[in-house]
Amino acid sequence: MLSRVANSLYWLSRYLERAENLARLVEVNRYDSLDSSVFSDDPSSDNIWKPLLYATSLEASFTEAAKDDPDLDVVWFITFAKNNPDSIRQCVAHARENARMVRDQISEEIWRELNRFHLFIGSEKAVQLWNDHPEVLYRKIIESCLLLSGLINATILHDEGWHFIQIGKNLECADKTTRVLDMLAFEGRPHRTKLGSALKSCSAFNAFNSEYRSSITLDNVMRFLLFSASFPRSVRFCLQQLDNHLHAISGTRVGSYDNEAERLTGSTLAQLNFSSIENVLQAGYHPYIDSLQRQFNDIGQHVFETYILLPLEIRSLRPSEIQTLQRQQQQQQ
């Protein structure tokens, strides 16, 4: 498979997963904002939305954008802002552009639904819906992303291209789950309702209750979203899927590795397989999660180096130059 095709399929999936996760995070935090008892004695807008900006790494971007527009709304910035490359609208636009680059690799159904989604999220109708019934808008975004995920699994060959799609999806999902957990670490001692909101942000509330009944504690939420072997959005589950798809592409036996992306994924997966909540407590919630996020960044970087850049190019580039090329490539697409 051509490297540009692999790259576009990978980013198509990552951007759709990112849009879905952002919509769910905003939806849940919006409900929380309606009940000031969830928060501390200060129910201000900053207290409500600052953890979300922090966890999604949008704090600096929002601060910069707010210099030109002091009245800039945080939720608008995350949902619609064109000057935010990671807003939901821009994620959908990036996904559609990557799909256009590999039109022959996806089905008519995927292309039609993605176009419909792209036109809707960029329309005045979406803005009006956000003003009148924001909960309906975010539910439509989530449902569109889930529909596209289903179409991807049901209407294209499960070949090498599909494996690249799954690599992007699972790496993005693992990263976003750790960011939800980082929001809890940011809170210090989160209220029980905030713990429930974190679970809902990962669509994990019912699954968690099936396993832990009504015992919603910070340790149990961390344990479930980090280490569950059967919940699809847990970090461990996503890394297991990522490992499987990387080995399916290379043909290397699971448990061994053929490239640095496989080695790092296997190493991170082993860490999760043999860790416990006691290890997390010993390291500290935030340092442990921060370490995982750095490992995810390294895995993504080595997927890029292994399958997108040619070997001769890698030898002649410094790490900072590779990262710049990766950003430029996505901006051009």
Image (spheres, rainbow, N blue to C red):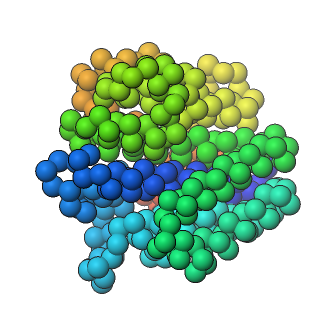
Residue 52 seen: no
Q: Is residue 307 left or right of residue 181?
A: right
Q: Is residue 307 left or right of residue 65?
A: right
Pick out the residue farthest to the bottom: 68
Q: Residue at x 64, y 53 (%)?
A: 143
Horizontal and vertical percent for residue 154? 82, 43
Residue 176 seen: yes
- Of 22 and 207, which appears nearest the observer? 207
Horizontal and vertical percent for residue 162? 76, 44
**251, above or below 12, in the image:** above
**253, above or below 194, in the image:** above
Q: Residue at x 13, y 50 (%)?
A: 41
Q: Is residue 65 left or right of residue 82?
A: left
Point out the image quarter for the C terminus: bottom right
Horizontal and vertical percent for residue 206? 51, 31
Q: Residue at x 29, y 34 (%)?
A: 192
**4, above or below 226, in the image:** below
**207, above or below 96, in the image:** above
Location of residue 119 (image quadrant)? bottom right
Horizontal and vertical percent for residue 228? 50, 23
Q: Is residue 141 left or right of residue 199?
A: right
Q: Residue at x 31, y 82 (%)?
A: 69
